[in-house]
Image: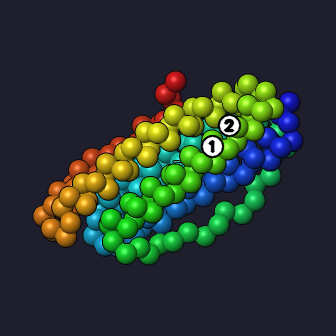
Amino acid sequence: MIQATIQKALIEQLNREFHSAYIYLGMSAYCSKEGFNGASNWFLVQYQEEIAHGMKLFKYLEDQSVELQLPAIEAVAVEFDSLLNVFEKSLAHEQFMTQNLNDISDIAMKEKDHATYNLLQWYVTEQVEEEATVSEIIDHIKLVGDNGYGLYTIDKELATRTFVDPTSKA
Ligand code: OFO
């Protein structure tokens, strides 16, 4: 049985994971509209990853017999300033997610809830990879600046991303 404070925090995190998916759907729509079809694909894969994060948490809450609440998912942006801006917003969002996961881990540790703490470490590790990947893309976009051919090449690279269920990793 999970302690009430942790239940509440995990239900909020569940909402954030699905909100993240929605955020990436908005980013994908923006990129597609601007002709960055590779980046649009990249964000669609990111959308799928966030759904997988949400479903892993959903399953955990069910396994722990938590009485679920599913509050509304907040509206998201579909307009951005540039390709660089959309990836910078994505990084800021992932940093926000990392902070939340660290905060809930702190609560789980304080409450000696080892099962939840263990689950959260999977997410914390996943965040390291996500932040590193987005930071690298931002570096590449900054490197080419406004150079059209450079942006085209980056977009082609982003088109190669395919979905691999992150929850199939240990
Ligand atoms: Fe990328 O955020 Fe989920 O956990």
Relative to 153, does residue 108 appear above or below in the rendering?
A: above
Nearest the eye: 145 or 55? 145
Do the CB atoms of the residues marked 1 and 2 lie less than 8 Å apart?
Answer: yes
Picture residue at 64% right of the left edge, 54% below the top:
16
Left or right of 155? Residue 26 is: right
Please name the amino acid that badge 2 sits on: Ser
Few, some or many C-alpha atoms within 10 Å of disc 1 (few <14, some 14-19, many ≥20)?
many
Nearest the eye: 113 or 22? 113
Colouring method of the image: rainbow
Relative to 3, does residue 75 appear above or below in the rendering?
A: below
User: Which element is circle 2 on?
Assistant: helix
Few, some or many C-alpha atoms within 10 Å of disc 2 (few <14, some 14-19, many ≥20)?
many
Q: Label 1: which residue? A: 101
Picture residue at 27% right of the left edge, 70% below the top:
35
Q: Label 2: which residue? A: 105
| Residue 99 shows in this picture | yes
Query: In the image, is the residue at mark 1 within 8 Å of ligand 1 by its beta carbon?
Result: yes
